[in-house]
Amino acid sequence: MIRRRRIEIVASAEQRVVLRHAAVRVDVGCTECGTRMVTPDEAAIISRVNTRTIYRWVEMGAVHFMEHSGQLWVCLNSLPMNPQGRES
Ligand SMILES: [Zn+2]
């Protein structure tokens, strides 16, 4: 008789994201909560999803966003820091 054992390995990691900008920075905070805004690329790094997912969240109204100087800005405070359990 063959006995099978299932071993589940759970790993976690902490990531620190430092945002540095030489390009245009938006001075206006989020109109909904006043928090700093980031670009979709930055939002993707922070939320550990791809940029396309960020655009989808914007279209769904799942995150605070605004357009300023032809650039889309996403509210840092409305991003899920832990995207698990969220559709990506
Ligand atoms: Zn906001």
Image (tube, grey):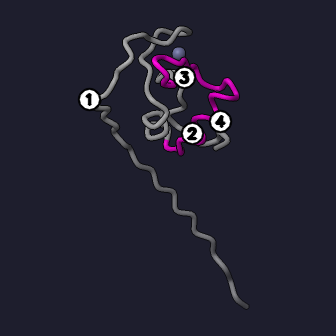
* Camera-side residue of 8 and 1: 8
Label 2 or label 1, whichever comes before in sequence order: 1
User: Quarter of the image containing the C terminus?
Assistant: top right
**Three-letter amino acid code of the residue under disc 1:** Ala
**Three-letter amino acid code of the residue under disc 3:** Ser
Q: Which residue is mark 4?
A: 56
C-alpha gap between disc 2 and disc 1:
28 Å
C-alpha gap between disc 3 and disc 1:
24 Å
**Three-letter amino acid code of the residue under disc 2:** Pro
Asked if marks 1 and 4 touch (Cβ < 8 Å), the reply is no
Q: Which residue is mark 1?
A: 22
Label 1 or label 4, whichever comes before in sequence order: 1
C-alpha gap between disc 3 and disc 4:
14 Å
The percent coordinates of residue 81 (x first, y second) are 49, 33
Query: Which residues, given as a range, are shown in magenta?
Result: 48-72
C-alpha gap between disc 4 and disc 2:
14 Å
Callout 4: 10 Å neighbours few (<14), some, many (20+)? Answer: few
Q: Which residue is mark 3?
A: 78
Callout 1: 10 Å neighbours few (<14), some, many (20+)? Answer: few
Label 3 or label 4, whichever comes before in sequence order: 4
User: On the rendered structure, is 6 left or right of 70?
Assistant: right
Q: Which residue is mark 2?
A: 83
Between circles 4 and 2, the one closer to the viewer is: 4
* Camera-side residue of 36 and 73: 73
* Camera-side residue of 70 and 31: 70
The percent coordinates of residue 64 (x first, y second) are 57, 19
Examine the rendered structure and indicate whether residue 14 appears above or below residue 42. below
The percent coordinates of residue 58 (x first, y second) are 62, 28
C-alpha gap between disc 3 and disc 2:
12 Å
